[in-house]
Image (tube, grey):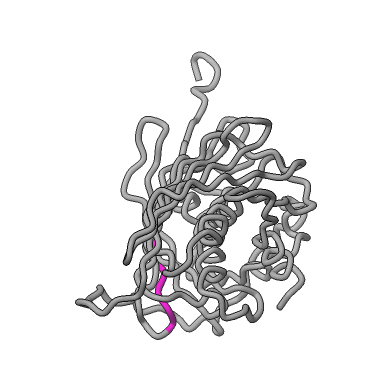
Amino acid sequence: MSQALELLVDLLDLEPIEVNIFRGVNPNEDRQRVFGGQVAAQSLMAAGRTVAAGRPHSLHAYFLRPGDPSIPILYEVDRIRDGRSFTTRRVVAIQHGRAIFNMSASFHADEVGLSHQFPMPEVPDPETLETLAVRLAPHRESLGDWFARPHPIDQRHIGALPFMPGAGKEPSQRLWIRADGTLPDDPLLHACIAAYASDMSLFDTMLAPHDLGWDDPDFMGASLDHCMWFHRPVRADEWLLYDMDSQSAFGARGLARGFMFAQTGELVVSMVQEGLMRKSPGPAGS
């Protein structure tokens, strides 16, 4: 396990401070706000810590306010329902006395049933592709601290990088992702790390057709909501093909969907995210 992945696993090991209340810490990094994937993963972990049986099968979440990276986050879990097959939880993440994130999560005891899926796209093997660090090395000066920072998820992009400058790229992308090391055999932990990784690329798919970047002073972007469905058991420390596209952007909001396939071809996770894509009109007459 790499040091960065070990740190992520530690971040997901929430501290129980009262019945149904957990405390999560933030990494010691220079960020303006907490990474949304971290809050989603910690919220799912908080919910799972109160569930006796079953694996996560879906989550529906809203990002309400930017997270403050300088203080811990409190997670309050509401035990909505404990059924024989399904268990439902609601989680509210709180900082400075206000909700910054809200999630409903459902857990399902394994059952035998009908099965089908659409096929995994044909793509190059991940081991034949360059790492993201190698591909971004020519831009290390402009990336600054982000480039030097260790990352817990190994990313191998197929084709053009969607977040590089230049308009007109297709609103779609494919990449292989994998936790940078071997994880314990804990289904909840693997689902949480998949949730963490799912928020790393979806928004970039919405931006791909537009000549805008996160550092553009005329652009403001943020995740608004995030939904995931865990169809089959997921191993976050094995290669997952992350296939994404963005069907629409309008009225300062964009929508993207993603699908994670195991390297053996099984569709393991589907997700949808809506993002705020606000662009200033610029000075009068421009």
Residue 169, magenta (yes or no) = no
Q: Which residues are magenta?
A: 258-263
Residue at x 59%, y 55% (from the top left corner) = 42
> Image height check: is 151 above or below 63?
below
Q: Extreme left residue here? A: 114
> Image height check: is 244 above or below 185?
above
Q: Quadrant of residue 250?
A: top left
* Residue 133 percent location from the top left of the image: 68, 68
Q: Quadrant of residue 56?
A: bottom left
Question: What secondary structure prevails in the magenta region?
Answer: strand
Residues 283 and 145: in front is 145
User: Can residue 36 be seen by looking at this rendering?
Assistant: yes
Residues 248 and 51: in front is 51
Residue at x 51%, y 79% (from the top left corner) = 239
Residue at x 44%, y 82% (from the top left corner) = 263
Say whether residue 282 is left or right of residue 231.
Answer: right
Residue at x 53%, y 38% (from the top left corner) = 221
User: Can residue 170 be seen by looking at this rendering?
Assistant: no
Residues 183 and 85: in front is 85
* Residue 182 percent location from the top left of the image: 64, 81
Residues 89 and 38: in front is 89
Residue 259, magenta (yes or no) = yes
